[in-house]
Amino acid sequence: MLTGIIVYGLVNSSILLLVALGFCLTFGVSRIANFAHGAIYILFGYLMWIFLNWLKIPFLFAILLTLVLSGIFGYVAYYVAVRRVRGIVLSEVVSTFALGVGILEFFRWMGFVTYEFSLPPIKKGSLYILGFPIDYQRLIIILAAIGLVAFLYFFTHYTKLGLSFRAIAQNERTAIALGIDADRVAALSVAFGSAFASVASILVLPLGIISINSGYEALLIAIAVGIVGGLESIPGMILASLVLGFVQIVVGVYVSSAWVMVVYLLAIIVILVVMPSGLLGKFKELEERV
Amino acid sequence: MLEGKNLIVFFENAIAVNNLSFYVNKGEIVGILGSNGAGKTTLMNTISGLIMDMKLKEERKGGERITVLGQLLFEGKDITDLEPHKRVELGIVLSRERHPVFLESTVEENLRIAACSRRPKESRIGIDFVYSIFPHLKTIRKRRAGFLSGGEQQMLSIGMALMTKPKLILLDEPLLGLSPILQKELVRAIKEIRDDGVTVLITEQFARPILPIIDRGYVMENGMLVMEGKGSELIENPEVKAAYFGV
């Protein structure tokens, strides 16, 4: 039982991290809460499905195409949906959420709701770890989560674009004074966020079917992980994914699987009451903010 | 090199810069002296283009209206409506007031971030150049900027501005809040920067430490330039003495 909890806790944590990473990256860099994140996650799941089943594009090429298109989509979405209201937090949320609902309900209206919509796993089959069966897809998810975090670290510390991301995240006006184009960086941060969402959808969606509702759930996951971990700290997000991931599995095993979704909501409320800046967040505590 | 013609900047209910004309020649150190609220920082933001960004954000929010009138010329080119990052490309860079640096990054990372629009090799050369001007920064290069003293942050802030390889560097109150010893050190560095071929425009409240090194100075009051002269002339001027030396 314990092995099962550890293995599936890790898998679940990795899924949460993968789904949330893009949302938190965008917010951490440019303070844009991209509420279309869940919709983008589903949109590129469906696009991937269309590439594979309607257009018969080879698997690897379809992945590449999905990644590139999702980046472009994020970049354009910034200029279309966010730029005009940039800096007004509530309007940003309303505008991106509207975009997200539009995308999701469009697919519902198109009838993308049946069981045939599922993505193939990257590698079929399974193996035993410590006597416990686990399929390759879930292993790949764990590895991908680790890989993506490592990529993010190197990207933000050693590349020019990554450095400008961190500059804008820390002090936008100083960054501007040093010649960094804040609008472009913000658009690129949305682009990266949405590319990360499509990575998550390619890896996570094969575990089940692509459904409209999992788009809303993905947004909830992203917000929960972000708030619990502290929205701009990568270590915080890893910690939050682990905490939420394991708590969910434990709750699922010992209480009831009906309570699994409640974990997110409870965690958000508890964290906001007890430590509003998140577990490892760098936002100032409430009293300091005043 | 830089010329402002009848610059006017007004916020919704205050004129910050009032019909101001000035020029900076290549290779000069030009000082703008003025007390708190004289409009020095607004002028610096106008030259560096930060005001464009502030204006845009206020407009999007429906907040305070900021109006910029007049003309700014840099090397004969009209830059009045240019975005700040394009001005940096042209070679104008601002070290902001109260030295805001990237507090969570180390000193060396700060410098690398500042050079992120340049090629890696140039960035390496730039870092060596900054260390040659501020040898102290090299000894603390692994420290996080948030743990630096005000003087060290100021050096870093100027160093970061230098990383963009500017032709004209704008220093907004670099000596504010520093001890006399550190002020001396910075004044030496500013002179060295000029001797390396970078034109310097500097604002300051307290004229005493910088008057000896400036070639020309303007005195600013309520958004207007009320006096202009060579550094040595300003030192002798009784009004300047009374107002800015605290005599």
Image: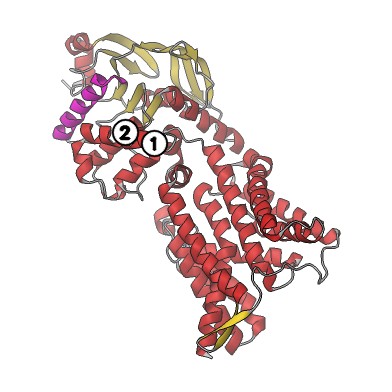
Q: Is A245 situated above or below A91?
A: below
Name the spot of residue B63 as percent of width and height, x first.
57, 35
Chain letter of disc 2? B
Q: Nearer the viewer, residue A121 or A14?
A: A121
- Other residues around mark 2 within 10 Å, as few (<14) / some (14–19) / many (≥20): many
Up the image or down, B208 lies above or below A7; here it is above
* Frontmost residue, B64 versus B98: B98
Residues at marks 2 and 1 touching, judged by CB atoms closer than 8 Å: yes
Tell whether B235 sits left or right of B34.
Answer: left
- Residue B115 is tagged as 1
Residue for point 31% across, 21% down: B198
Looking at the image, the residue that sits furthest to the left is B181
Name the residue furthest bottom. Answer: A1
Quadrant occupied by the N terminus of chain A:
bottom right
Disc 1: host chain: B
Is B24 left or right of A151, judged from the image as shown?
left
Are the residues under marks 2 and 1 on the same chain?
yes
> How far across and down, in percent of the image, does residue A67 sit?
64, 53
Q: Is residue B221 visible?
A: yes
Amino acid type indicated by mark 1: Ala
**Residue A290 visible within the image:** no
Q: Amino acid at mark 2?
A: Gly
**Classed neighbour count for the residue bearing mark 1: other residues with Cα under 10 Å, few (<14), some (14–19), many (≥20):** many
- Where's residue B28, x and y in %? 29, 14
Residue at image mark 2 = B126
**Residue B211 horizontal side relative to residue B108, left or right:** left
Q: Tag 1 or tag 2, which sits nearer the N-term?
A: 1
CA gap, disc 2 to disc 1? Answer: 8 Å
Q: Which residues are magenta?
A: B180-200
Numbered mark located on residue A94 in the image: none
